[in-house]
Amino acid sequence: MTKYMVANWKMNGSLETAHDFCQTFTRLFHAHQTDNTIVIFPPHPYLSFTNGALSGTDISLGAQDCSGASEGAFTGETSATMLADVGCSYVIIGHSERRQQHQESNTFLSDKIKCALEANLRPIFCIGESEQDFETGKTQEVLKTQLQVLNDFKGNDKLILAYEPVWAIGTGKVARLDDIENTCAFLKKELFDVYQLSSPILYGGSVKADNAKDILSLQSIGGVLVGGASLKPDEFWKISTAIVIPKKPQTSSFSPKL
Ligand code: 13P
C-alpha cells in the first residue's frame, strides 16, 4: 500500500529556492523512482511554477489552505476551484497554525472541506492536541471534538487525516513511537466506527530523515506530513524513500502460445 510523503513548505522560500528544490528533487525521483505518493505544498504564489517544474513526474501538487466560499467578495482568499485550476490535487485544511492564528472553527473547516471536495481536491484534514492537553491526558477527548467536522463527510473516501501533536511541530520534540501508534490506532477505529471512513492517517511533527523509517513502519501510519525537513530536497527524498515500495513490475500483454 502506498505511503503519503507530504512536504508542507509553509511560508518559506522564494521562486529561486522552489526552482532549486524541484531541480534536485526531480533528478532524484527520475534516478530512483518509488511507488510512495509524494505531494509538495508550496506557498500559493509558487504553485503554478512548481506544477510546471514537477511535470513529467508522478509527484503531485497541493495547497496549504483554501477558502470556505466558492467565489465572491473575499479579498485575499483563494478558492478550491482556483487551486485545482493551477494544478493542485490536494489541499491541507485545519493545520494547527491556521487554527491558532486565524481562529478556524469546526463550522468554518467543514465549509472548506466541502469546497475542496466540490473542486475535486483531496483534503488533508489536520488535527492535534496542545502540550497541555497531552500532559493532562486529554488527547483523545480533544481529537474526538476535532473529528466532529467529519460528520458532514461520512463515508467519503477522498479524505485523508493528519495527526500533528501541536507540541511536536517545529520543536524537534517528536512524539514517542508508542504514543503515535496508540493515538493513530484510536483515530483509525474512531474514523471507521463513527464516520465510516478508512482514510489514511499521516503523522506530522518534527519528522526528519533519521526518524522517518521508524514512524512510517508503525502499523496505523499511512504517511508523514513534513514541515522544516521538507525544505531540503535531499532530506525530503530520504524521508520519501525511508520505506521502500518498489515500482510495480509492468504487466506484459505477451502470452506464450501453448
Ligand atoms: P515540522 O516538520 O517542521 O515539525 O512541521 C510539521 C508540520 O506542521 C507539517 O504540517
Image (tube, helix red, strand yellow):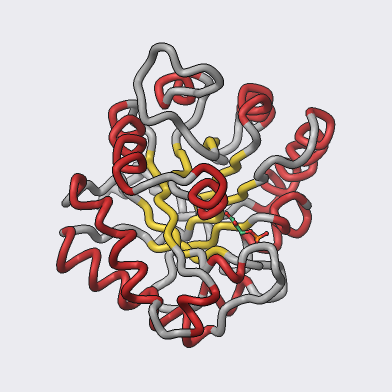
- Residue at position x 29%, y 59% from top? 147
Q: Image quadrant of residue 50?
A: top right
Give the vertical position of 123 relative to 227 (above or below). above
Residue 23, given in percent of the width and then of the height, sits at 78, 37
Q: Which residue lies most toward the top here?
A: 72
Query: In this image, 4 relative to 14: left or right?
Result: left
State which image quarter holds ligand 1: bottom right
- Residue at position x 15%, y 68% from top? 193
Q: Which residue lies most toward the bottom here?
A: 178
Residue 26, given in percent of the width and then of the height, sits at 71, 41
Residue 66, given in percent of the width and then of the height, sits at 46, 32
Residue 27, given in percent of the width and then of the height, sits at 75, 42
Query: In this image, 30 relative to 90: left or right?
Result: right
- Residue at position x 47%, y 44% from top? 92
- Frontmost residue, 112 versus 1: 112
Q: Image quadrant of residue 142?
A: bottom left
- Frontmost residue, 143 versus 238: 143
Query: In this image, 168 relative to 134: left or right?
Result: right
